[in-house]
Image (cartoon, grey):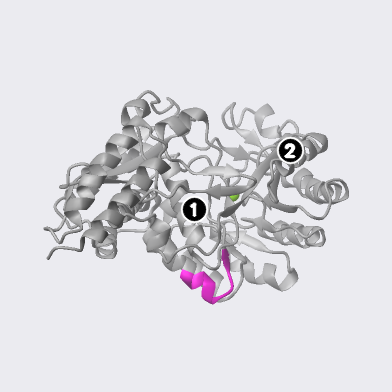
Amino acid sequence: MSRPSNFDASRRQTLQGIAAAFGGAGLLAANNQSLAQVSEKTNRGSAPIRIRKVRAITTAPQNIRLVVVKVETTEPGLYGLGCATFNQRPLAVVEAVNKYLDPFARNRDVDNIEDMWQNAYTSSYWRNGPVLNNALSGLDMALWDIKGKRAQMPVYQLLGGKCRFAVDCYAHAGGDDMKELEDSVREHMEQGFRHVRMQLGAYGSPHLSGAPDFRRAGFGQPQDQHMDSGPYLRMMPKIFKHMRATVGDEVQLLHDVHERIEPIEAIGLVKELEKYRPFFIEDPLAPEQNGYFKQLRQQTACPIAMGELFNNPHEWVNLISERLIDFIRVHLSQIGGLTPARKLAALSECFGVRTAWHGPGDVSPVGHACNAHLDLAIHNFGIQEGPKFSDAMREVFPGSPTIKNGYMYVNEAPGFGVDMDEKLAAKYPLPDHPGYWEPIRRRDGTAVRP
Ligand code: MG
């Protein structure tokens, strides 16, 4: 059945808008031209478009191991990109994508994302681990990207449209002493951020702990870090007190405990920080200690954010339904992509829990765009950990989200609006180091959870 001619005219205008949104970059212009041709064909009720190939691409423009999945289709020029970045085990994800997901997904219809997700998820029988979830996320996000391109809409439109004009982000302030940290907080406030996370040195401020006994005793490896909780626990309340006295009450201050202390120490710390009105305290407990959130909640009204290490719905369902946390902050690719994340957002909304998706450096611009598209479309958005892209990263990933005045903006191109220059990506191979976390130890050498 043919469509009225004014539909074609309006579609042409949309496609011209897409090209304008990409700013005329050669790669994108060529892609958009073929996308325009694709749209002319695919919206006319032609045969289903099928997956031709699923492959993982690695790159490290910021010296961080990124894994992006590209889904190619039977329609020339139509493809999607998804983030499958697992910085500590990238090659395991590459194998999972190329050896297992590719043969699984070939020849399947690109349209049925939910069905694809459910079947890919159980196709290994054993499930819910970070390697397979990241691989699945790459496929899932790429299918959403394709659906947006077919619909000629940004993904946030497919999710219901905008709830806000842009995505409010928090920035990372850091320094090894009070003065350096205060300067860093002020610098981010001057850039327009209303929310600033403060870390004194590395997570848990290991530089406060001095020379460890385990090193003198020849225990562990020379590069192992040392962190005792005492100096950190004594210093954090002083940091918050100092910042409230110097940078004022207006700025929202955040802090990430990064699970590096014992549960009872975390309860004591969060209680002590409550009077300085943190926007939230992040990951006070390790996922293995989820049972402690009840005790924490009973003793303080300090907002709690949790979940960047979560893989499995059983890790978050009770925390949300029992109203034990205030912000859910999973890593979208770690839980399997946009499909499970939008359900998690809806579950959270029912219980008054807001979102704060994990947005560190080890997420590709495609993944950050996915965070932002979901942030734009959900009512219970809380805050977003904002990305910082180098020039090299933006060259490899044209169309990456931008940050202005503390807000993240996506472009209005169809799908996630982010492309990848594969030739340029190949110029940034993965670093030689395999990517694992260096051990952290207490004074006597006991391993600390990172
Ligand atoms: Mg964190």
- Position of residue 141 measured from the top left corner of the image (x, y, whole percent): 35, 52
Residue at image location 36% in from the left, 53% down from the top: 133
Res 331 seen here: no
* Front-most of residues 434 and 32: 32
* Front-most of residues 360 and 235: 360
Q: Tell me: 400 left or right of 322.
A: left
What type is the residue that disc 1 sits on?
Ala
What label sits on residue 187 in the rendered view?
2
What label sits on residue 372 in the rendered view?
1
Residue at image location 43% in from the left, 34% down from the top: 65
What is the count of numbered marks? Answer: 2
What label sits on residue 164 in the rendered view?
none
- Position of residue 66 measured from the top left corner of the image (x, y, whole percent): 41, 37
What type is the residue that disc 2 sits on?
Glu
Give the vertical position of 276 relative to 322 (above or below).
above
Write down the quadrant of residue 180 in the picture: top right
Give the vertical position of 133 relative to 19 (above or below).
below
Residue at image location 35% in from the left, 51% down from the top: 414
Q: CA distance from mark 1 to mark 2?
A: 24 Å
- Position of residue 226 measured from the top left corner of the image (x, y, whole percent): 67, 36
Write down the quadrant of residue 199 in the picture: top right
Residue at image location 62% in from the left, 27% down from the top: 218
Q: Is 253 included in the stretch rendered in magenta?
A: no
SS at circle 1: helix
Boundaries of the magenta span: 346-354
Q: Is 351 included in the stretch rendered in magenta?
A: yes
- Quarter of the image with the C terminus is top right
Q: Earlier in the sequence, mark 1 or mark 2?
A: 2
Give the vertical position of 17 relative to 299 (above or below).
above
| Mark 1: few/some/many CA within 10 Å (<14, 14-19, 20+) | many
